[in-house]
Image (spheres, rainbow, N blue to C red):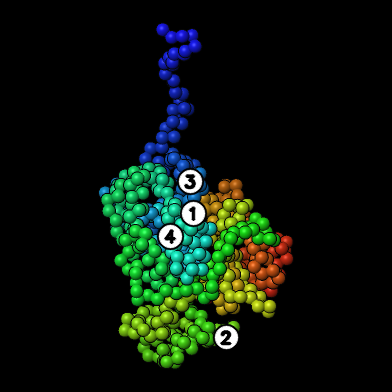
Amino acid sequence: MTSPSESVERPGPVPVLTEQLRVLVEQLQHPAGAVLRPASHEDRPLRGTTLFLAQCTVETQVGRFIAYVFQDVIHKGYVIALAHGDIVTAPVLYTRIHSSCITSETLRGCDCDCVQQLEGALKVIHGKGNGILFYLMQEGRGVGYVAKARDRMLVQSSHDQISTFDAYRLMGLKKDHRSYEDVADVCHLLGIRAPFIVLTNNPDKTAAMTAHGLKVQGTEALEFEPSPFNVAYLASKADSGHLLTQASAPHVKRALPPEPVLPFRPHALAGAQRFIYAASYFLPVKPVDNEVILSEDQFHRLFQTRSIEEFMQGDAPLVEDYYVIRGNRLLVRINTANILRFKAENPGSPVVDLLTTPYWFRVHVYFDIVTGQESVVLTYGRPLLYDVAVVRIQSESLFNRFPLVNVDNRLKFTRAVRHIVHYGVGAIFLLYYDGRGAGFGAHATDRMMLEHGMVFTSDEAYRKLGVGYDSRDYDAIMRLIRHHYPSGKIQMVMNSPSSLVKKKEYATAMNAHQIDVHKWIFLDDSTLSE
């Protein structure tokens, strides 16, 4: 018997599901392959915390891929699944789980091997016929660009005496903060059941994949010859367990920044408290159009035993042209292929150093407490009183981090870099992500609508999305321009006169912050090959 105070749990009636509830339950279960078999154009399956946003075709220089775009509804990171061939019934899939790297994939930085791994993996996947690359917004092994930039600042200030992983430990970070749970959700939503051959040098990555229930059949390495700018970084990766055979590279001389790097504590900008100045370091940027810039001292050191004219002669000249540019610097246009052949026979020749002479930009990373995103500024040169800095506001596109057939957006960036380097003083202020400020999800949806004939123009797509023509935060960028160039007098790089007319918010923000444009430079007037 039970006392009156005790309760007895009795079985209740079995609930009868209404038709509407039954449909909802089916939707919540989301059978495998839900993205490939949508109920309608408006269907947006959600598995775990991973929401499907859009799909569209991506034409790369190695072949055609289908991009399936997802977003995590908690940490808001995008996941791009670039698929080639049959990903549902193929017996095995070649795959790479790739973490984003804005410096190498957007800014032409050469202090890591990330862009080589990205492009190399796409080439392997296309060549194998069936495969998929998962592009995750997990900059700096998952710590984000603020922490990654502080790591670079600490490493450079130590002259490579501490490694990336030492810097992470000093900052209270683990060596790897990445998560692959979204990848498991994406595989379910795409109906992927095949085992993977993973393109990686990192055993920890395959272990993490297995822990999330992903089937790993094997691995293939993606390794590239170290350079003076990434040899220390690759050596630290090898020490942490990456399977790299060339990382020690004793024949590669480490390159140090052109000036000392002094670490500092994060602090708010006095004139714009929304920005917390988090880090600053030097980024070696790949030269544009094979144009190397040398100081007088560098020029004399390289050509003190043999004149530059000697290297311009013969059937395979190493130097195609050179001339003096502003600031008593020398522009030397090299023939990379010929120098590489010359290097094989003359590895100790000073002229070989032309292959590894970058443009040294200083990267400034700010954390914007209003948007919760990083703001990135690249500056070049030290402005004197009579200098009028060349400034470019560059809108980044995530798709343009891939080796696309259409390189228009990349060319805008490289043309801007060229104008800045030729003048000798300037900056690039990065705006991201995509969609004219509406976000990458809006941009991918715009492309999907156009491909499926749901709209005829991007303007129509944006009206359906309920987004204005331009949502970019120009006011914030103008505040950063005034911070770097207090006089407000600049040379502004724009795409074309028509783009200036169309961007009313741009002009309004410039006027509000008293930006005095001494000269307009229009990229449509520039000629340049990548």
Along the polypeptide, which appears first: circle 2 or circle 4?
Answer: 4
Residue 36 in view in this figure: no
Please provide percent x and percent y for residue 492: 64, 70
- The residue lying at 29 percent from left, 56 percent from top is 219
Query: Is label 4 in a helix, a strand or a loop?
Result: helix
Question: In this picture, is 182 found above or below 5?
Answer: below
Depth-wise, is mark 3 or mark 4 nearer the camera?
4
Residue that badge 1 annotates: 172
Point out which mark residue 121 bears. Answer: none
Please name the residue that numbered disc 3 is placed on. Answer: 72
Q: Nearer the viewer, mark 2 or mark 4?
A: 4
User: Label 3 amino acid?
Assistant: Asp
Labels 1 & 2 near each other (Cβ < 8 A): no
Is 309 on the left or on the right of 377, as rendered? left
Label 2: which secondary element: loop
- Name the quadrant containing residue 58: bottom left
Q: What residue is pinned by disc 2? A: 328
